[in-house]
């Protein structure tokens, strides 16, 4: 299954990044941000891509009043 294979997730993120680069290049610089969400395997694949390409990783939490 795709969500249980960190290498497939890594490759998907890298493909998305390449397509994003070519699409947004005429507009200037853009940035892919990787959120640390999902399963452990998804997180490992996302972390691999973030480390490989220096993508920022942001975590946002909501708090109830």
Image (cartoon, helix red, strand yellow):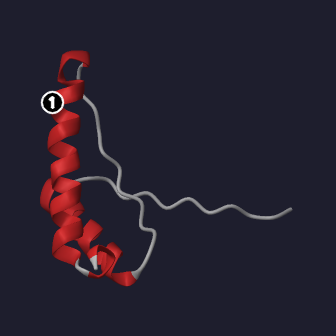
**28 or 9: which is nearer to us?**
9
Q: Outermost residue toward the top? A: 26
Residue 54 position, x and y percent, is 20, 54
Q: Quadrant of the N terminus?
A: bottom left
Q: How many marks?
A: 1
Residue 10 position, x and y percent, is 19, 65
Q: Outermost residue toward the front? A: 1
Q: Residues within 10 Å of mark 1 (few under 14, many from 20)?
A: few
Left or right side of 26 for 3: right
| Position above or below: 1 against 54 | below
Which image quadrant for residue 65?
Answer: bottom right
| Position above or below: 23 against 64 | above
- Which residue position holds label 1? 22
Left or right side of 18 for 13: right
- Secondary element under disc 1, as helix, strand or loop, is helix
Which image quadrant for residue 27?
Answer: top left
Residue drawn 18% across the image and 34% down it: 21
Residue 53 position, x and y percent, is 15, 54
Residue drawn 33% across the image and 74% down it: 42
Residue 52 position, x and y percent, is 13, 61
**39 or 49: which is nearer to us?**
39
Residue drawn 23% across the image and 60% down it: 50
Q: Outermost residue toward the right? A: 65
| Position above or below: 41 against 17 | below
Which image quadrant for residue 63?
Answer: bottom right
């Amino acid at each position: 299954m795709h969500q249980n294979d960190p290498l497939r997730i890594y490759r998907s993120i890298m493909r998305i990044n390449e397509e994003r680069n070519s699409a947004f290049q005429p507009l200037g610089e853009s940035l892919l941000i990787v959120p640390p969400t999902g399963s452990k395997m998804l997180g490992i694949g996302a972390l691999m891509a973030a480390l490989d390409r220096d993508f920022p990783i942001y975590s946002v939490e909501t708090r109830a009043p």
